[in-house]
Image (cartoon, grey):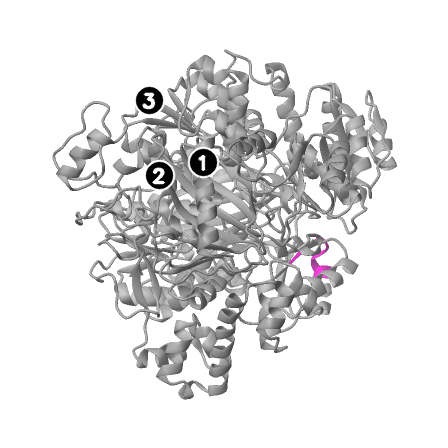
Amino acid sequence: MSFLRPQLVQPFARNFPGASVRYFHRSRVSLALAPSNPVRAVAAPAVGSYAPKDGEHVLSSPSELARKISAKVLPKLPRPDVQKVVVVGSGGLSIGQAGEFDYSGSQALKALSEEGVQAVLINPNIATWQTSHQLASEVYFLPVTADYVAYVLEKERPDGILLTFGGQSALNVGIALDKMGILERLGVQVLGTPIRTLEISEDRDLFVKALKEIDIPVAQSTAVSTVNAALAAAETIGYPVILRSAFTLGGLGSGFANTPDELRDLSAKSLSLSPQVLIERSMKGWKELEYEVVRDGADNTIICCNMENFDPLGTHTDDEYHMLRTAALKVIRHLGVVGECNIQYALNPNAREYCVIEVNARLSRSSALASKATGYPLAYTAAKIALGYTLPELPNAVTKTTTACFEPSLDYIVTKIPKWDLAKFSSQVNRQVGSAMKSVGEVMAIGRTFEESLQKAIRQVDPRWKGFEVYIEPEDLDDALTKPTDMRLFAIAYAMYRKNYTVDQLHELTKIDKWFLHKVDNIVQTHHAIKAAGSLENIDQELMTRAKRMGFADSQIADLVSSSEDQVRAHRKSFGITPFVKRIDTLAAEFPAHTNYLYTTYNASEHDVEFDEHGTMVLGSGVYRIGSSVEFDWCAVTCARKLRDMGKRTVMINYNPETVSTDFDEADRLYFEELGYERVMDIYELEQAQGVIVSVGGQLPQNIALRLKQTGVNVLGTDPEQIDNAEDRHKFSSVLDSIGVDQPEWAEVTTVDAAKQFAGKVGYPVLIRPSYVLSGAAMNVVYQESDLEYRLSAAASVSPLHPVVMTKFIDGAQEIDVDAVAHQGKLLLHAISEHVENAGVHSGDATLVLPPFSLSESDMARLKVIAEKVASAFKISGPFNMQIIKKPNEGPEDDPELKVIECNLRASRSFPFVSKVLGRNFVDAATAAIVGQDVPEPVDLMAQKRDYTAIKVSQFSWTRLPGADPFLGVEMASTGEVASFGKDIYEAYWASSLSTTGFKVPRAGSGMLLGGDVTKPEMATVAKKLFELGFKLYCSSPAVEEFLNNIPYISAKRIFFPTKDKRKLREVFDEYDIQCVINLAQSRATSFTDEDYVARRNAVDFGLPLLNNARTAQLFVESLAKKIPQGGLKGYVEGRIPSEVKSWREFVGSRV
């Protein structure tokens, strides 16, 4: 959790496991500044007629005199002469490198286009806003690897390259390109921070030497590249030690080791992910702090903000703050960073001793958070600095009245809490949080008191949580309090509410600072006061005001006095208690600001804005989690921009700091706020909005759509009653029956016996799922009765209150996705994508192919008819998505059966993919249909023939989740996606597979480890093909060995396979040169020593490609066979540009 606090309060630092506190230094601006009128979307240049002469840099100031003087005083820096710049993106969203790079890359592209520079973007993440033609002039959906970036540089011949906006991936590529000599040969200038600085910040030995030159202490560490060297280094330093990998993301492969055995396992794993690891003295118990620093080419340097994380925390004094601030400025200047960077320290709580842990000489996750929390657009500023601007001449893009060389100060408090989606991975994943990152997203809440900000943030992380209440009851409470886990906050709630732990006791166990615990205790005391009131009538104006100022939700108060949320709302409004809207202005209201960057609070006495715009509200997607990610941000941004183009005012609500939709210039008004019913109603009533759009932000806005309508809100587009009909199994089923659309047999059961009866009737396998779920939570395919009993006790407590839906599961069926847009029940656009995997893999994890490769003309026509019938039956106005299964036909003459398994009356995660592949923006059309203005004519995009194929592949983060079984099932597990184009399915699949972060192509003639279910027909064809291509085949089980050696002309060797000793297993992999694991198991492993599980798990732990699905393994091997003759395994060769290296425009035929 992170926490930003206003500098107006005496700064203390307190916190939480992995929490961070930010402090702001206030600097006085010496020039008197007058307000200028707000200009939409682009920072206004300063007024005054003095124009800079050649090479002069001029202060951004309304004062003519100041501009003239500054032209003589500011250093004359030559600006780089660039017309075309390549921007390297970050690839698919994974744990450690997520949506924050879509935001920072988009900011950089905005800055380039303002300067008239042509931007060429390389990023295979098709779901992002930055990969739209609105920002870049050319987009390449290709792997972010040195080879592919080199091909693009050779083809495009740019003048410059930006490496600091694509996370660690882009940085590593830049360093590799420099080593290959390509940048120098092609005359490509590295803009911003120079390569040498990037190398020094990434290579530990160089980094330590550089900091010693200026007497800055660094954590005592030794860089090693073998396991034995690691053990020797630890002996010298003394246990416990921390191991960190160089050149990796978000602490990947790092951790603590207390004994030589622990270090042996950890270093074996880490050295497979990174060429070099560091063994350093463990500073557990020290405070960890981060500073965000900006420096320009003229050596002007500012600290944007600082944060504190890691517990235990001591008090943080001004004296320490200035010591670290001075060190930060010294380090950044010495290293020569040009742009933005982040520096991390460890600070001894008991002495004035500190050391630098690391410097990220690039935009990081915390820079996106810092930008949103302070209103200082770090990425935009860094891009301008890279183009040769200096801080004094850049205007502050948010206030538009001050210059960019100020340090922000705030009059509000921000709390950031990560979203850990660890529950998705059942019992396998260790829930403890440590030095390696495990969170998939984060929320940011803004309030005027810590209590208000904290409770808001808790509700944002999970809509089921209403605030700081008891949600878990740990058996061993003291253990739950001592060890930081994703749920420790609620262990503290349990200790305070139920077990009456005191602040002192909690401080002893958690080492969380008392100041912080006293604040939480204020929430607890207010909770008790509300409960003591006994009924809603007894809550007077004073108590209601106190509760709202402490951040209590209406529904939370309702639970405490056995009332309903609507009654509490009415009671509260009868006292005239409603929230105030405040503006974020980066200057603590010291200067007039004109931002539309807003939040609500009860700790205020007046509004900062007039409510005279009556805009259209767009509800965003909320926190990134498994099942809802950056693709919904693309939909929300596209929708808001389309509304603006139609001449409508827009109001965006979202609370995710990693998104483009929460950028201050994407909507006329941005509320950094909760997406629950209460807050949406508050904003709707204050703004007197024209209507609300609920169908572009994923599942969260859909959940409140019906309530909004029932309260009299004008919900635009498809009627929420119809949304409910599609979400409710019974209603949905009867609608399909009435229009003659087929569906698999299903039943809703409330007892285990009824479940067995249904399974007996339709035959196994069956699919079971609890009612109303997001992204397949707790869904399972069951193949036999014994399994059914276990699943119904584990998946859900089956009861009349919690019924379970059972569906006949069709084995071997093909799954098809239909994305469409309709207006008043009439189909306007539709896209039909085909899954490579058979049904049984969640559609969010499946490999999608568009245009489809195996569907006949008659299948396509029948699918279109189903889409037309569904659109008409639900009277859809806006986007919708269906999943349909195609059951293989019994006889050669029969048409295959098409059965609808799911329908969502909202935009789906594949909307950006189909829009970009077909060259037609589905969300633009959907927005027109929702508001009923400029509705396009229907067009059949699927009837048009295309000479290219695009494939979307899921990005998994298994490496980050120690213990999780990398197995694909009906539960969604991927954290992101990538897509590439090609002339056929093989070329597209090759490029998209290589686009997944960290994919290493196996070397020619290396070893392949095969395992899993030998009854799968693909096992034999895959083995045959690999053997023909010259790979060596290995296996661990006698059954697989016998099966493989019975195939004519093939020989496979069974190898010794230690399932419990990771170090020995690493040696076995090295001995046989195993570079790829193909494991086609029937089901998820039940034990940690299962050979298939060990093979899958170690493939990801050792950074090797894992193919865990029969259909995709077959496709990969076929693609490999096509690519090897073209030199696909050889790496970059000058002058040989592969055929898939074409821009999006070249494939689609136009700028979309």
| Badge 2 amino acid | Tyr
Look at mark 3 in the image and give the residue it sits on.
Answer: 82
Residue 380, which numbered label? 2
Residue 983 drawn above or below residue 187: below
Q: Which residue appears at 46% of the width and 87% of the height?
A: 533
| Badge 1 amino acid | Ile
Residue 517 rendering spot, x and y as whole percentages: 53, 68
Q: Which residue appears at 42% of the width and 53% of the height?
A: 697
For the residues labelled 2 and 1, the Cα–Cα distance comes to 19 Å
Residue 160 rendering spot, x and y as whole percentages: 39, 22
User: Viewer-nearest of labels 2 and 1?
Assistant: 1
Look at mark 1 in the image and give the residue it sits on.
Answer: 332
| Badge 3 amino acid | Val
Element marked by disc 2:
helix
Q: Earlier in the sequence, mark 2 or mark 1?
A: 1
Q: Are marks 2 and 1 in contact (CB under 8 Å)?
A: no
Can residue 904 be seen? Answer: no
Quadrant of the drawing holding the C terminus: top left
Residue 831, which numbered label? none
Total marks placed? 3
Element marked by disc 3:
loop
Q: Are marks 3 and 2 in contact (CB under 8 Å)?
A: no
The crowding category of the residue bearing disc 3, from other C-alpha atoms within 10 Å (few below 14, some 14 to 19, many at least 20), is some
Q: Earlier in the sequence, mark 3 or mark 2?
A: 3
Provide the residue span drawn in magenta: 759-768
Magenta-colored stretch includes residue 698: no
Left-right relation of 475 to 856: right
User: Viewer-nearest of labels 1 and 3?
Assistant: 1
Q: Earlier in the sequence, mark 1 or mark 3?
A: 3
User: Outermost residue, left direction?
Assistant: 49
